[in-house]
Amino acid sequence: MEEFVTVCRRGEIPPGGGKTVEAGGKLIAVFDDAGTLCAISDVCPHMGASLSDGELEDGVVTCRWHAWRFRVADGTWMNNPRIKIPAYEVRQVGDEVQVRLAGGS
Ligand code: FES
């Protein structure tokens, strides 16, 4: 089982927004969804845009390029909920934001 790794400071994630971090060779988008931290793959499966740059509303991020939408809590693709992109456990320890790489579901 992978350990949590520190990816950034809490203050680096804007309220209601996201930030791209790198951990274990993966690009991960960490979001502040109404005060709750969520982490999914940052790479949009359509054409690779950064999802952390998308518009976050009601727990769903909309890709800036062509508006594909993903639930930040678990990576569900809203257009076809049977398909998910990787989602990661995320936690805050003090001022540090930590992501657990294993089990991206
Ligand atoms: S690259 Fe994200 S919707 Fe096209």
Image (tube, rainbow, N blue to C red):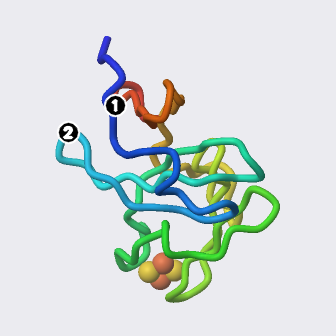
Compared to residue 51, the image places residue 94 above or below, namely above
Who's the residue at 43% across and 75% down the image? Answer: 46
Compared to residue 72, the image places residue 17 above or below, namely below
Residue on which the image places disc 2: 24
Compared to residue 13, the image places residue 90 above or below, namely above
Residue reaching furthest to the bottom: 65
Q: Give the percent coordinates (x, y) of residue 81.
A: 69, 53
Q: Give the percent coordinates (x, y) of residue 98.
A: 42, 32
Per the rendering, the mark at residue 73 is none
In the picture provided, is 36 more to the left or to the right than 21? right
Residue reaching furthest to the right: 58
Label 2: which secondary element: loop
Label 1: which secondary element: loop
Who's the residue at 70% across and 42% down the image? Answer: 36
Asked if the residue under mark 1 is in contact with the one under mark 2, i.e. CB atoms within 8 Å, the reply is yes
In the picture provided, is 46 more to the left or to the right than 33? left
Residue on which the image places disc 1: 101
Who's the residue at 75% across and 56% down the image? Answer: 59
Q: Say which of 95 and 73 sits in front.
A: 95
